[in-house]
Image: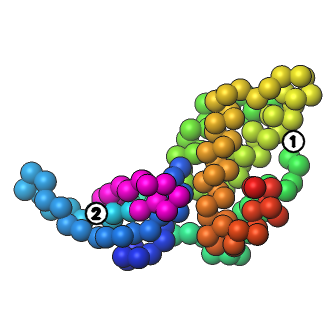
Amino acid sequence: MFRKGEKVVYPVQGIATIIKIEEIEFDGNKQTYYKLDFPSTSLKISVPKETADDIGLRKPLKKEILIREISELSKNKVYSEKELDELVDKSQELLNSGSVKDSVSLISKIRAWKKIRNEDGKPLTTSMKSCLNIAQDFLKQEVEHVLGENSLKIYGLE
């Protein structure tokens, strides 16, 4: 599926490089693992090849697809109160999916919620600020990798 040296996207953490593909024996069972290095941090993790798809490990999106997905960020969408209320419960699920579409949706909804709260003179909750930062950082990495650093400003991700 993936090769050594290839860039991949891991949910929540973002862009990683496969630095090694290795077989590890544990309790008499051999399993193949992708060893990932995240250049934005010192994090290194091993992902079982068998469960890589289930975890959400994927190749970065092609330019055209990524542009189409992130262009949704520039649209001023209106969300129902119910959608925004459900955001707290669904935010972790959206973050963990590793999907650009889910990250864009989460960012758009949190920005809309933030605007409403600002109009009411209330700040965004700490947990929603955290979710917004995580989703934006995740998205920034893929945008920067695929489209280049200059694209971050275009899509409001600086």
Which quadrant would the N terminus be assigned to in this image? bottom left
In this picture, residue 93 sits left or right of residue 148: left
**Residue positioned 64% across, 36% down in the render:** 130
Tell which circle, 2 or 1, labels the residue nearer the N-terminal end: 2
**Residue positioned 75% across, 55% down in the render:** 157
Residue 55: x %, y % from top left: 42, 53
How would you rate the neighbour count of disc 1 (Cα within 10 Å): few for under 14, some for 14-19, many for 20 or more? few
Residue 40 visible in this rendered orientation of the protein: yes
Q: Which residue is mark 2?
A: 33
Kind of residue indicated by mark 2: Tyr
Q: State which mark lies toward you, 2 or 1.
A: 2
**Residue positioned 86% across, 47% down in the render:** 77
Asked if residue 97 is positioned above or below residue 151 in the image, the reply reads: above
**Residue positioned 13% across, 59% down in the render:** 25
Q: How is the image coloured?
A: rainbow
Q: Could you say which quadrant of the image residue 4 lies in? A: bottom left
Q: Is residue 19 magenta?
A: no
Q: CA distance from mark 2 to mark 1?
A: 43 Å
Q: Residue furthest left?
A: 28
Marks 2,1: beta carbons within 8 A: no
Asked if residue 134 is positioned above or below residue 83 in the image, the reply reads: below
Q: Could you say which quadrant of the image residue 74 lies in? A: bottom right
Kind of residue indicated by mark 1: Val
Mark drawn on residue 78:
1
> Does dot 1 land on a helix, a strand or a loop?
loop
Q: Residue furthest front?
A: 42
Magenta range is: 37-48
Which quadrant would the C terminus be assigned to in this image? bottom right
